[in-house]
Image (cartoon, coloured by chain):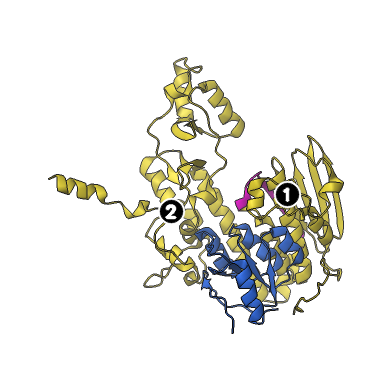
Chain colours: A yellow, B blue
Amino acid sequence: MSATKQKKKRVRPAAILPESGPELTASAAVAHNAAAVRLEDGTIAATMAEGSPTETGMTAGKPLKVSVAQVLTYELRVRDAMTRPPVTGAPEDSLRTIQNLMKSHRISGVPILQNGAPVGLVSIEDIINALDQGHVNDPAERWMTRNIVTLRDHFSLVRAVAEFDRHGFGRFPVLNSAGELVGVITRGDITSCLMQHLEKRAEEVATREAAQTPGRARGQKLAEPMVLRAEVKAGDYDSAGKVSQRMRQILRMRGVDPDIQRRAAIVAYEAETNIIIHSIGGDLSVAVTPGKVVIEATDHGPGIENIDLAMQEGWSTAGPLARELGFGAGMGLPNIKKCSDKFEIHSEMGAGTRLYSEVLLHKAAPPPVKKRPGKQANS
Amino acid sequence: MATVKARPLTKKVEADLTGCYISDLLSDVLAHASPGMLWVTIQTHRNVISCALAKDIGTVLFTCGRKPDRAVLAEADAEGIVLLSTKQTTYEAAGKLWKAGLR
């Protein structure tokens, strides 16, 4: 009898196997997640059905006809959609404090941490219940939900959607493989993440189509100015480069000279990573007009103490994490300046930094970097 | 002839190379690498892809046996970038690439 019990215990559901195990190539990684699942929001799934689902590696056995949104829910991870860093409270915080946190961050649930580990979660319902009975100054631990269910950051969004359906919760705290709380995910996060990626795919399709049909159809739309704007969060290294990649697609679509495309991409990428590494957060905007690309990066602080120093190659104030990831070479601002046709930077301590760069689209500008001895000629 | 034994990590495994640049600092790559070069690095973070895209670098070789996580591999596949991984150190790989005629 005890033998069967033990046997049962040892069996782990395949779904919660950690990321370890055999090394997976990229195509295997996608196939690994292939499982029949229903997408919650039918409207998204229906809007775009791309011609060749085989590209995505979803063909385990016979080809499946899947919508782009469905493919995305397999490909995307909880970590791609979650809000980070998580807003958390302590067990001794009053419900009033938690309520204020919710208000200022516009969220409806706050995980409660004790010694770094999540021990509970206060939702807006908990607060309402406490308010009802006049206990809003009680410590959070008295009212929080204790038996919380968490998701791991490497779970696919498919799995996350299934968990939302299963438990009916409004949000899940997200843990990384080390068991640390790294974010919170809501259904809304999943929807907006999907929308964002769908938009990107749509643009890629448009780019491809534009490349295939030269001439008329291309000309009209391309002359219109286009503005990309994105909030850039401090420390969000994973998102770096997204705006510059989209800008590249637009420039490519408009047939801009590849060298000019690259210069604009470098400006946008460096400006974006500057905000991530050095500021408390800010915005990046890229305006593409027929004549030029205008890249503006604004952050909320702390500001650059000495701009002349910051403009020197090799001078950097990047912290250890940024350096470990390969940032902090001290070449960000010099690179931006070299690649810009017009460059301005203003900074005020305590107020923030504003960077303005223009890259002209039609000028046959010399390459930003001197040819170095011994370098192979490029095509 | 000298060869670098590397394991392909992406679906796409072939690309033409115009030369090679070695650096673990992203801004340095943005400043000094040229389009079409092979980039040799120990960095496996997602920003390697962003950086390669900005610079039109189509091939990245990770040394010391390093491999990026699946999200990075998926992104490389989506963008058509070739990723390779070798157990050799950057120095050994560089020597062999040079010897193999990549200059």
Q: Is residue B45 above or below residue A216?
A: above
Dot 2 alpha-carbon crowd within 10 angstroms: few under 14, some 14 to 19, many 20 or more: many
Q: Nearer the viewer, residue B87 or A177?
A: B87
| Residue carrying label 2 | A158
Residue B52: % across, % down: 66, 65
The amino acid beneath tag 1 is: Asn
The amino acid beneath tag 2 is: Val
Q: Is residue B40 left or right of residue A138?
A: right
Residue A90: % across, % down: 51, 27
Q: Which residues are magenta?
A: A224-238
User: Which residue is located at x 63 percent, y 81 percent?
Assistant: B100
User: Which residue is located at x 73 percent, y 65 percent?
Assistant: A251
- Please tell me the numbered disc located at residue A321: none
Chain of the residue that carries numbered disc 2 in the rendered image: A
Residue A327: % across, % down: 68, 53
Q: Secondary structure at mark 1?
A: helix
Task: Mark 1 and mark 2 in contact? Answer it, CB < 8 Å.
Answer: no
Q: Is any part of residue A191 visible from this angle?
A: no
> Does A231 appear in magenta?
yes
Q: Earlier in the sequence, mark 1 or mark 2?
A: 2
- Please tell me the numbered disc located at residue A274: 1
